[in-house]
Amino acid sequence: MTTSARSRNNILRPFDVMFEQFGKCCQLIGQCLILLCRTIGYILRGDIDKTETWRQCYRIGVQSWFVVAITALFTGFAMSLQISRELVMFGADTAIGGVVSLALVREIGPITAGIMVAGRVGSSVAAELTTMMITEQIDALKVMRVDPVQFLVVPRFVAAMLMMPALSVYAMALGLIAGIIIAYTAANVPVATFLDSVKQTILDRDFGTHFLKAWLNAIIIIIVSCAIGLRTRGGAEDVGIATTRTIVWAMTLLFIFNYLVTAVTYAPR
C-alpha cells in the first residue's frame, strides 16, 4: 500500500467508524421494536408469570431504592442550592419552591431514577441473558418449547412498568425534601412559603409528563438490555461487551426521549 493510499484510508477511517455505528444502531432499533411487539403480544394475551414478575419487582424496585435515594437527595441538594442563591440575588426567593419542584417533577425525578435503574438493572439483565446465551440455556428453553421472550422478557417488562413510576415519584419526593432543607438553610425561606410556591406552580399535566417519562424509561431499559442480551454470542469477553453496550445505548436513549417528551409536552404556563 502506497503512502497516499494509507493517508487516504486514515482520513476516511472516522467516516467508516461512523457508518459502522449507524448500522449497528439501526440493527439494534429493529431488534428492539420486534422484541417490544412480541412482549406486548404476550401481555395482551395474559401470558404472564406472576410469581416471576413479583420477584423481578423486588429486584428492580426494592433493591434499587437506596441508590435512587442517595442520587436523588444529593441532586436535589446541589440543584436547590444553585437555584436558591441565584433567585435570592434577584429578590425572587419566594419562587424557589416553584422552580425547584417544576424541575423535579418534569425532569430530575424521572431521569435520576432512569439512570440508576439503567446502570443497576439494565446491566444486570444484559449480563444474565448473555450468559444464558453463551451457556446455551436459551437453546435449552427452545428445545423444551418455551419461548424465551415469554419466560424471560415479559416478567421483567411488566415489573419495570410497575416499579419505574414508583421509583420516579420516590426520587422526586426526596429531591423536594432536599429543596425544602436548602431553601430554609441557605435562603431563609419558610417551609410554608416554599410549599405555597409549589402549589401555585405545579399543574396536573406536569405529573402526566412525569409518569410518561417513567414508563418510557422502563420500556427503554428492559427492551434494550433484553435485545442485546438475547442477540449476543461468543465467550466470557462478550458478557462485558454486552453489558457496556446496554448501559451506553440505554442511557443515550433515555436522554434523547427525555428531550423529545419535554419538547412535545411543553406548553406556556
Image: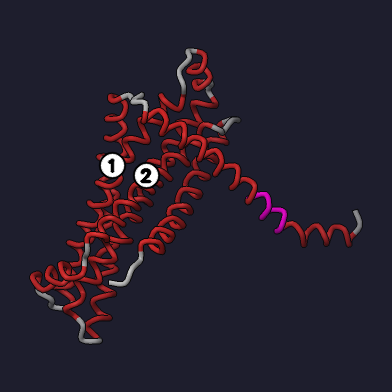
Residue at 36 percent of width and 61 percent of height: 265
Residues in magenta, as a range: 14-21
> Is the residue 118 above or below the residue 36 in the image?
below
Q: Are marks 1 and 2 in contact (CB under 8 Å)?
A: yes
Residue occupying image coordinates x 68% and y 53%: 19
Whole-percent x, y for residue 42 in the image: 40, 28
Residue nearest the observer in this picture, 89 or 144: 144
Residue visible at 48% across and 18% down in the picture: 141
Residue 80 lies, with reference to residue 172, above or below; the image says: below
Residue at disc 2, secondary structure = helix
Asked if residue 116 lies in the magenta stretch, the reply is: no
Residue that extends furthest to the bottom in the rendered view of this protein: 90
Q: Residues within 10 Å of mark 1 (few under 14, many from 20)?
A: many
User: Quick check: 29 left or right of 258?
Assistant: right
Mark 2 sits on what residue? 218
Above-or-below relation of 51 to 261 = above
Residue type (three-letter) at the residue carrying disc 1: Met
**In the image as oriented, which residue stretches furthest toward the top?**
144
Q: Residue 264, image x and y in percent?
A: 40, 61
Gap between marks 1 and 2, in whole Å?
8 Å
Task: Name the residue tied to disc 1.
Answer: 163
Question: What kind of element bears circle 1?
Answer: helix
State which tag comes first along the sequence, 1 or 2: 1
Specify the principal SS of the magenta part: helix
Residue 78 in the image: state x and y as whole percent.
Answer: 28, 68
Mark 2 residue crowding within 10 angstroms, few (<14) / some (14–19) / many (20+): many
Q: In this view, does 13 lie to the left or right of 31?
A: right
How far across and how far down the image is residue 118, in percent? 40, 46
| Amino acid at the residue labelled 2 | Ala
Asked if residue 71 can be seen in this view, the reply is no
